[in-house]
Amino acid sequence: MRRAVRCRRIAALVCVVGCVGVACGVGSPPPPISQASLVAHWANDEGVRIAFASDHTLRAVGLDHAPGAEAGSCPAATKGRWDFFGPVNDSGSSFSDESLTRGGMIAVHGKDDTCTFIAVTRKDGQALSLCLAQDPEPVCTDDETLRRSRPVRSR
């Protein structure tokens, strides 16, 4: 039941992001990132840090102040799961699926199911970054942007 509610909440957000992006002329999909490239420590200068692991788990710090999370929904430190979203279908919807190995949008689910948000890939020069903002504008501010800092070691 909890997973169904979480999936509907994130699917609705993806639908809104996709529709607003097309309406604003942004329209182009975010650049895809492979699972191998995503599995790393990502951070920003505001103290948000997320470690994505290859088994689809994550550890995060600072999400209580992350722009992409619903206000007050995330604890300062959390564990959870992540997965990629599939392509947007004809009705404008997309669903996250743990079997996908690459994508431009990543669903982040906190352990307690209240901390859910989307990280959208952005091209920053030659490097990819993750934008935690819910606003689909092509520019992501520094406090919304996470940059890859180092790979995550195998467990």
Image: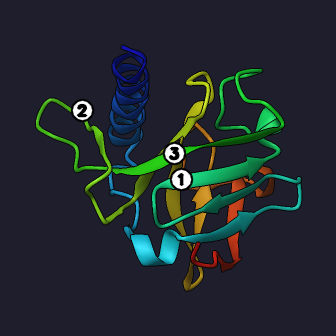
Residue 48 location (% of width, % of height)? 80, 52
Marks 3/1 in contact by CB < 8 Å: the verdict is yes
Q: Which of the labelled discs sits on residue 93, or is there none?
A: 2
Residue 52 location (% of width, % of height)? 58, 61
Quadrant of the drawing holding the N terminus: top left
Q: What residue is shown at x 88% (from left), y 54% (from top)?
A: 47
Alpha carbon distance from label 3 to label 1: 4 Å
Q: What residue is shown at x 55% (from left), y 64% (from top)?
A: 53
What residue did someone put label 1 on? 57
Label 2: which secondary element:
loop
Q: Amino acid at mark 2?
A: Ser
Residue 45 location (% of width, % of height)? 88, 61
First in residue order: circle 3 vs circle 2: 3
Residue toward you, 108 or 143:
108
Q: What residue is shown at x 76% (from left), y 63% (from top)?
A: 43
First in residue order: circle 3 vs circle 1: 1
